[in-house]
Amino acid sequence: MIEIKSANGAPLEREDLFGRAFEWADHIPILERSVAPPPPPTPPVIVTPPVVVTPPVVVTPPVEMTPPVVSLTLKGGNGADLLTGAGKNDTLAGGGGNDTIWGHAGNDSLQGDAGNDTIFGGDGNDLAFGGDGNDSMEGGNGVDTFYGDDGDDIIFGGAGDDGLWGDVGDDTLYGGAGNDTLGGYIGDDVFFGGDGNDVVWGNKGEDRGWGGWGDDTLGGGEGRDIMYGEGGNDLVWGGGGDDTLYGGIGDDTVGGFVDNDVAYGNEGNDSVWGNVGNDRLYGNEGNDLLGGGLGHDTLNGGAGSDTLMGGEGNDYFWGGDGEDTFHFFFGQQARDIIGDFNISEDLIRIQGGPSSFKSLKLSQNEGDVHVHLKNGTIVIKDVDVSDLGSEHFWMG
């Protein structure tokens, strides 16, 4: 298209170009002031691509690997430490201070060292040393071996066949269930065997021991000890010192060993021995055997059909209820006394002498009968010589 302007730049009218008679329809079109710009191009249609949905990525978590539990070896310092095992065969030592040590499961080695320590073995066969100080120790299940060491210690064995040793100090030991061994060493110790066939040994000091239920063996050792067998067929020995011993329920053997002891068989068919010293022996209930040994002893059979043997020394016999037998040796050098001879049921046995009653020499001395032996005399209290015959004597 063509745009025509005047010389001065003003727009032209149609009449200025061709006159009024010119018909525009027959000629080229003339623009009125300017030619209009072309319409803008149609923008292209933008095709949006379809959304591609990406499936979520499944992330597989890594397999969790449990690290293996290994045995621990720990040692505390000089403070109040808390040491805990890993449930394996651990070695834990408290060091100085009042420590608390837990072994947990496993066969642990535990040591309190100096200080008033608390030690728990837990399950397993544990070995523990309290060290110096007043320690508290407990074994738990398993066959444990505990040493209190120096100090006044308290030790509990728990279940299992445990070995508990107090060492130096006034210790208290509890065996618990199982066939336990308890030993005191030096000090005035207290023992409780608990259930099971236990062995208790007091050693030095004035000790007290209770066997509990089971066939127990109790020995006082040196010192003035008190020992109770309690339930079961027990063996109870005093050792050195003036001891007091009790058999308890069951067929027990109770012996004083040396010094001046007091021994009781209690229930059951018991054997009670004084051994060396001026002893007092009591059978109590049951058919008991009592032997005085060396020394001036007192023997009391109690209820039941008992056998009483004095041994060397001037002994006193009291049979108690039942058909009792009083045992002597013809050559003994002693003056023995029978305090309650019952002519209806009791018997006197004399060994090592004449084979018949007729060979014995008997005499009346006021209200008593004297039976003359080779080197000694038997005094039968409150009996008339005319009431005695061969039925009352067992010769040989």
Image (cartoon, helix red, strand yellow):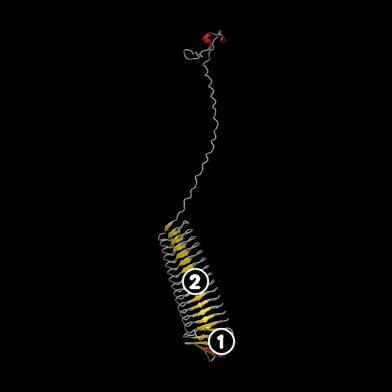
Q: Circle 1 sits on which residue?
A: 390
Residue sitting at 49 percent across and 74 percent down?
236
Q: Secondary structure at mark 1?
A: helix
Q: Position of residue 309 (x, y in %)?
A: 51, 81
Residue placed under numbered mark 2 in the picture = 217
Q: Which mark is residue 68?
A: none
Three-letter amino acid code of the residue under disc 2 = Thr
Q: Quadrant of residue 184?
A: bottom left
The answer to whether 42 is drawn above or below residue 303 in the figure is: above
Tell me if label 1 and label 2 are in contact, CB under 8 Å.
no
Q: Is residue 110 among the parts visible in the rendering?
A: yes
For the question of whether residue 171 can be seen, the reply is no
Q: Nearer the viewer, mark 1 or mark 2?
A: 1
- Count all numbered tags in the image, as a single digit: 2
Vertical side of 64 occupied by 190: above or below: below
**Gap between marks 1 and 2, in whole Å?**
42 Å
The extreme right residue here reads 344
Residue closest to the far front: 355
Q: Give 57 or 216, whichever is nearer the viewer.
A: 216
Q: Residues within 10 Å of mark 1 (few under 14, many from 20)?
A: few
Question: What amino acid is at disc 1?
Answer: Ser
Where residue 221 appears, as percent x and y from the top left, is 45, 73
Image location (x, y in percent) of residue 93: 42, 60
Badge 2 crowding class, 10 Å Cα cut-off, few under 14, some 14 to 19, many 20 or more, is many
Image position, residue 179 (x, y; %): 50, 66
Of labels 1 and 2, earlier in sequence is: 2
Between 11 and 347, the one lying in front of the other is 347
Please name whichever residue, 11 or 115, is drawn nearer the observer in this view of the structure: 115
Q: Element at badge 2?
A: strand
